[in-house]
Amino acid sequence: MTVSFVAASQLPTPFGIFTLHGFADEHTGKEHVALSMGDISSEKPVLMRVHSECLTGDALFSLRCDCGAQLQTALQTIAENGRGLLLYLRQEGRGIGLLNKIKAYELQDGGADTVEANERLGFAADLRKYDMCKAMLSHLGVSQVRLLTNNPRKVQALEQQGVEVVERIPLQTGQNPHNERYLAVKAGKLGHLFP
Ligand SMILES: Nc1nc2c(ncn2[C@@H]2O[C@H](COP(=O)(O)OP(=O)(O)OP(=O)(O)O)[C@@H](O)[C@H]2O)c(=O)[nH]1
Ligand SMILES: [Zn+2]
């Protein structure tokens, strides 16, 4: 795993001005980014979101999932806190890629749930990896985090790499009539924690 820092710039957003850090993942050829606000390299644990790419939800306003709302709420929460970090990982469709995700959506339109659709296409339910996070966090000087997620597997994956997750903060937002089944499958089959 080789992930190298390439460049950083300011990124003004409706929530505040972040710093955008760009990383090249030489193993996969993917380009990941981190958005930081405030002094994240000081000792205090950093409020952090690890967000996996979802073009449809993050950029195209899709209501099939909760990704767009989670991205917005995470950036807003970090900005309100005045200090924090969002890692935006380019692993679209839980790692199967955009076109395969559209194939999975087609199967879901025919009745399959998100896990069944992946399996029918020959993929495991979730192919994501989080090993690039360690290199990104080392570059940014972050070793302890308060993680915004409902996914306990994300907590485990970070801890396995030596990132200390001192707290898991639920990130429940964006429920709507179109994603009821999607959220139910996350809770029922993928282990997400919804109170
Ligand atoms: N294969 C597949 N991927 C999906 C589908 N819907 C959303 N995704 C992808 O799922 C990823 C987001 O993962 P989620 O399972 O929603 O949430 P999470 O990141 O595990 O957990 P949280 O931190 O609680 O949000 C993004 O990469 C989306 O592109 C789907 O129906 N099929
Ligand atoms: Zn999504």
Image (cartoon, helix red, strand yellow):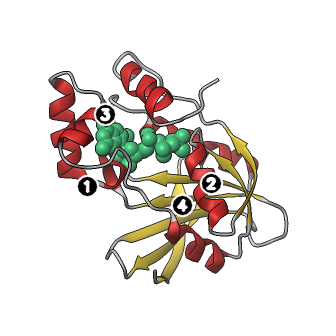
Q: Is 29 in front, or is 114?
A: 114
- Which residue is at a point 49% across and 81% down the rendered structure image? 7
Residue 27 appears at what percent x and percent y? 36, 79
Q: Furthest-right residue in view? A: 43
Badge 3 or badge 1: first in the primary sequence: 1
Relative to residue 99, is residue 129 drawn left or right?
Answer: right
Which residue corresponds to mark 1? 97
Badge 1 or badge 4: first in the primary sequence: 4
Badge 3 or badge 2: first in the primary sequence: 3
Query: Which marked residue is nearer to the observer: mark 3 or mark 1?
Result: 3
Which residue corresponds to mark 3? 114
Q: What's the CA distance linking mark 4 and mark 2?
A: 16 Å
Which residue corresponds to mark 4? 87
Q: Quadrant of residue 151?
A: top right
Ligand 2 resides in the quarter of the picture at top left
Q: Is 53 in front, or is 7?
A: 53
Q: What's the CA distance linking mark 3 and mark 1?
A: 14 Å
Label of residue 109 in the image: none
Which residue corresponds to mark 2? 156
Tell me, yes or no, if residue 143 can be seen here. Answer: yes
Badge 4 or badge 2: first in the primary sequence: 4
